[in-house]
Image (cartoon, rainbow, N blue to C red):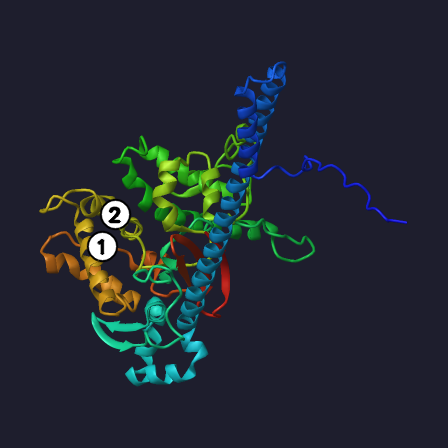
Amino acid sequence: MVLRSAPRAASLPRSATRPLPLREAFRVAGGAVKDTVRADVPGTSKRRGLALILALIIVAIVSALSAQFTYHTRTNLWMSGNLYASTQAYFNARSSTKIALLAVNAKKNFPEMQKFLNLMGSAAAQRLEIWQRACDFVNIFATGKAEFFGIALLDFTSEKAVGGKNTKADVPAFTCSVTSEDARVNVNRASTVAPVIDPNQPLNPQAIQGAALANQQRAAAQLYVQLGGLLHPMIDAGLFASDQEVIDLILAIIDYTDADDTKSEIDQSGNFAQGSGGEGDYGKYGYRTKNAKMDTVGEVQLVEGMTSDVYCKIRDKLTVFSTDKVNVNDADPLVIKGILCQAIEQDIERAQVCLAPGPNGIPPIDEAIIAMENCRQVKKSVYSTPFTSMSRFHEFFRQFPAVMGSGVPFNINTSIVSQQLGVTTKMVRIEATGVYGDTTRKMVSIVDTSTGALVNYHYE
């Protein structure tokens, strides 16, 4: 008996779930066209026309699927590349922050450095703020080179431990800037917590409430002066219509963070007092006053009267952290001017110093502020602290009229100034930037200089 193989099944078309390759689709379409244009076989024209239509439909479907596949493939490649670049830039920014933290905490982490600094004298060593040079150390690790006043001192470019990874050779992989957070105006300065009164204690509840109110009014007055220094000059720029609009905005900021629901006012004597009525019509915005500290500077945009233009101009000069006194070595000159003018107690003298134009066409206090700013920049350029004590700061403004021959003395109450200004840096802000190709990531960190701990950080 002869075994015969089963007849082979006729070849079946490819499954509909797997589209034809583009080359085969074009081959089928071409054959259909040839069959259609051949008219030697009678009665086949309709069948050939249908084959042409089907072939064109198949080609269109295959082309669309191929285009979609190509698009998704390229998109995935781009997303993978962006994710890789973003991750690399993130770690570059993080490296910058870690190096800067080592420099900020150098005195605490490296006792040997403190011994070296003591060779300059214990007083000078205490005044020297190494955090100001933190980014110089970062730059050494980023570029592999160390310079001092433009003179090349060291070259570590051949060492693997320095130099960040970046696809652009002329762009450092990470950079940073470090500033004193104490130079910013604390918008939470006037925030309060409702006093807890125990009726079983012998203390007078009314006395406790009175003391709390006095402290709040004192803090509100300080915030009023500091914000006034930033906001009042904006009247000339057209951002405010009058002084009253500035005052209303400052009072609204104070009311937004204090514990009570009563509107703050300024009495006829210029002192803060509790007024009557609510703290604003926030119901139309769908929220109410927070009556607590702001968590971010951006929250100040929720305050009634704060416009986007005003916020954009002052946001980098504000903080929400407890920085105590404003540091005169880094503070905005307008803030310093506002505090100094407020400390001139006689109205006539204040007008002569802060408002009336002097021989050079500007008020004498403006001339002094410009000279102070020039002095600050020169001292910082030579790695020196502009004012190492408040006594030197007061001496600068006391001697300025005589030195410059303005003829208008600055009768500034130094005790009032010292309540708001200081020379100590309590917190520093590190803004570290990581770069990889065209991708940039930024990490902002707030560091407590007394403990070296991170108070807050976020990525941008």
Could you tell whether 291 is left or right of 437 in the image? right
- Residue 287 visible in the displayed image: no
Q: Position of residue 329 (x, y in %)?
A: 30, 61
Circles 1 and 2, Cβ within 8 Å, touching? The answer is yes
Residue situated furthest right in the rendering:
1
The residue labelled by disc 1 is 411
Q: Nearer the viewer, residue 299 or 106?
A: 106
Specify whether residue 251 is in view: yes
Name the residue beneath numbered marker 2.
346
- Other residues around mark 2 within 10 Å, as few (<14) / some (14–19) / many (≥20): few
Q: Quadrant of residue 382?
A: bottom left
Residue 259 position within the rendered picture, expressed as x and y whole percent measured from the top left: 55, 45
Residue 136 x/y as whole percent: 32, 69
Local crowd size for mark 1, using a 10 Å CA cut-off: few (<14), some (14–19), many (≥20): some
Chain-order first, disc 1 or disc 2: 2
* Residue 243 x %, y %: 32, 35
Q: Residue at x 50, y 67 (%)?
A: 453
> In the visual, does 460 lie left or right of 140?
right
Which type of secondary structure does the marked residue at label 2 adopt?
loop
What amino acid type is highlighted by mark number 2?
Gln
Look at label 1 and name its amino acid.
Answer: Asn
Residue shown at 11%/53% (left/top)?
Answer: 407
Height in image: 145 above or below 370? below
User: Observer-nearest residue: 3 or 441?
Assistant: 3
Q: Secondary structure at mark 1?
A: loop
| Image-quadrant location for residue 69 | top right
Q: CA distance from mark 1 to mark 2?
A: 9 Å
